[in-house]
Every structure is written in C-alpha cells, then in structure tokens.
Amino acid sequence: MTRAREVGVVDYGDYQFEIYRSGLRGVLPKLPVEFSELESRAHAAMPPWVVSYVAGGCGNEHTQNVNVSAFERWGLIPRMFIGAAKRDMSIDLFGMRLPTPLFLCPIGVISLCAQDGRGDIATATAARKLGVPMIASTLSNAPLEQVASEFGETPGFFQLYTPTDRGLAESLVHRAEAAGFKGIVVTLDTWVTGWRPRDLSQANFPQLRGYALANYFSDPVFRGGLAMPPERDVPAAIMKWGAIFGHPLTWDDLPWLRSLTKLPLIVKGICHPDDARRAIDAGVDGIYCSNHGGRQANGGIAAVDLLPGIVKASGSTPVLFDSGIRSGTDVVKALALGATAVGIGRPYAYGLALDGVEGIVHVLRCILAEADLLMAVDGYPRIADLRPSALLPVG
Ligand SMILES: Cc1cc2nc3c(=O)[nH]c(=O)nc-3n(C[C@H](O)[C@H](O)[C@H](O)COP(=O)(O)O)c2cc1C
Ligand SMILES: O=C(O)C(=O)c1ccccc1
C-alpha cells in the first residue's frame, strides 16, 4: 500500500499480480474490477432514493453520458522501444509532492452510500491509506474537523459551498484552516440545484431531510442565526440551511474569497478559457475544470472537450479535472490533455457502497493499476511524457 511519504516510483500495476496470485489460492476479487459491473452491483446494494441522488444527473442526462463517452474519441498512440519498466505517477501540486495524480472529488452526502452512514470518514481513511487527497464537501455527515483528523499524512482540501451569509463562509474557511486542510476549493456551479428528473419525480432531496448538514449545525455562526439550537428544532435548522445555502457569486466577490485564506484557492466548475484567465488574474491558485458530472446543467458539452482550452488559458496554473472519469485509461487521457490532477467521483461512491473503506481502496487501486499498465505497455513512463501529441482524435 502506498503512503504519502513513499512518493515516486511505485508499481501500481502490481495490483493485477496480487489479483492473479490470490486466484491461485482460489480467491477471486471481492468487487468488480470494471466500472459498469461495479456500478450495477452498487446500484443493487443501495436504497433506490440514494441511487437516484448519486447516479442521477440533469435533464435527460445527455451531458452526464457524453462526459463518459467523449473519452472514447481519444486514443493513446502506442510507442515502442521505450523500456518503460518503471513508471512514475507522482505529481507536484501546490508545493506538495503527491504519489499519484488522483484525488477524490467532493461528494456531498457521500455518507448515504456507506452502510454505516460514516462515508465521509471512510473516504478520508481511504485517502490516508493511498495518499490520494480527498476534497471534503461542505455537505458532510461528520464535521470537517473529524474528517480532517483521519487524513494522516495525506493532504486534504475543503470544498466550500458559499452561503448567502459571508460570516458563515468565513467561519467555515477558518475552521478548515484550523483543522489542517491544505487548500480551499470553491464550487461555483451549484448555488442552485440543477433540474434533476430522477430526484424530482420522487421529490427526493436528502439535504432537506437533514442529511449531511453537520458542518452547518456545528458552526457557531450558523447556530448564532437560529432561534433555537439545531438539536432542539431540527426542521427549523434545515429550513434555515435551505434559505442560506447558495449565493450566486459574481466576479466582484472573488477578491473577498481570495482574502479569506492564504491557503491555495481553487475554483471548481470553470469551463471557459476566459473564466480561467480572469480567475487567475484575480489571484486564484488552481483552476478546476468540471461540469459537476452532468448533474447541474444539461448543456450538452462533455467536460473533457473543454479541458484543452482551459489548460491553454491557465498557463502554469494547475488544472484539476473531473467529470466522466471511469477508468485508468480515462485518467491517462485527461493527463495527456493537460490536467495536473484528475478527480474520481461516482466510482468511489460505488466502491464505498459495496465494501466501505476497502471498496474505495479497491476502486482507486484498479484505476491506478490500469493507468500504470497503460503507461507501461504504450511507452509513457512519466506523466510528463503524456502530452497532447500522445493522443489521436478517433471519433
Ligand atoms: C452524489 C454527488 C454529490 C456531489 N456533491 C458535490 C459537492 O458537495 N460539492 C462539489 O463541489 N461537487 C459535488 N459533486 C460533484 C463531484 O465533485 C464531481 O464534480 C462529479 O462527481 C464528477 O463527475 P463523475 O462522478 O460523473 O465523474 C457531487 C457529485 C455526486 C455524484
Ligand atoms: O448534489 C450535488 O451534486 C451537490 O453538489 C449539491 C449539494 C448541495 C445542494 C445541492 C446540490
């Protein structure tokens, strides 16, 4: 198992030998090694309303689907005589050396996927075990301090949903700093929930039933705005949350956001090169290209098709990417298109649903093994070798 301090050349592909060796003892992998099977098993294991919330997307889910299929329009060109016997998947991010280019996307209500309701903690534990950073959502069943206490040496990032109350935003950021988070990720595309037919047809919005509001209910500023503490009047606290949750930020808010912290500030949901440039000019440290997994807008463009423009506009500023990553090949292609680090979203939620911490670890190890073996076989031993010229458009 990789620890954050063992950064550098790690044989992630060895997971396949581990699987084959276990097979010699008659032991087969407990969980699927391929995404579609993982997804169907996880869906069968979770209550229907949780499946609806996690798997669902905006409108007829066209954007969500093309996020995935767009990766098939790129092919990695095999190179021979490279001798890629050792591969190095490590990256530099915000002055930190990380063993892999992966991170765990913020998934609010991830706790719902865990059989014991402790999904935030399980995700943090998996992050610690593999040295893969977790971006912890504002929407969490466990307060951010508890989540951070599980990280060990693995850096963690705090994802901020900016409420209408600036004082509450400041309080959340200062709590995240005090808890040891290494960066703040502000999500820009979800100040209002997108049109989600699966959930709408069942009137299913878990937050309004009180799920994943621990960061609010434990916050002194939030509590100060209530007539009674959340413990004494849960419905009133939930309604207050609904009233203050989302603030439609404008460029005028960015200097204030920047002033909140000296930690790296990353903006999530950036899809246009002009937005990337303007955010960088205003002092952000990282651009996070994402369309929220197609959950927010069914605009019809795959996130990965927007990535090259964002990378070009971002210059030397790191670009984080998610939306549609389902396999190691997808990771390799996103890196070749210029992503600095690549986010795993729904796949880890499904690993969690099936086997807790070990399920997440399994999903990440499968993705890392596949990426590593692709880099080996096709002759790209270092991430720096993965450049746009390594890809051929095939669709
Ligand atoms: C159930 C669910 C909850 C999510 N909650 C958040 C959240 O709290 N904050 C956030 O910035 N993004 C959230 N996201 C979006 C993810 O961070 C990420 O952008 C998305 O999952 C990527 O798409 P993919 O999972 O299809 O690869 C959520 C995604 C899912 C599936
Ligand atoms: O479900 C989501 O994707 C999400 O991030 C969210 C979080 C809080 C409120 C609405 C949506």
Image (tube, helix red, strand yellow):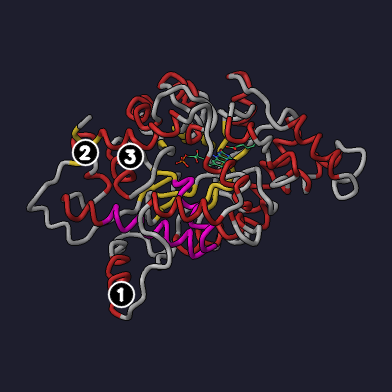
Residue sitting at x 84%, y 41%: 235
- The span picked out in magenta is 344-372
Quadrant into which the N terminus falls: bottom left
* Main secondary structure of the magenta stretch: helix
Q: Position of residue 254 (x, y in %)?
A: 59, 25
The mark found on residue 23 in the picture is 1
User: Quick one: 310 or 108, which is closer to the camera?
Assistant: 108
Badge 2 amino acid: Gly
The residue tagged 2 is: 75
Q: Residues within 10 Å of mark 1 (few under 14, many from 20)?
A: few
Distance from label 2 to label 3 (Cα)?
A: 11 Å
Q: Is residue 184 magenta?
A: no
Q: N-terminal of the two: label 2 or label 3?
A: 2
Instruction: Give amino acid for label 3.
Output: Ala
> For residue 233, what is the image quadrant?
top right
Query: Residue 333: where, in percent of width, then height?
Result: 29, 41
Give how far apart the Cα atoms at labels 3 and 1 are: 32 Å
**Label 3 sits on residue:** 334
Could you tell me how far apart the alpha carbons at marks 2 and 1 are, in whole angstroms?
32 Å
Q: Name the front one of labels 3 and 1.
A: 1
Q: Is residue 332 left or right of residue 296?
A: left
The C terminus sits in image quarter: top left
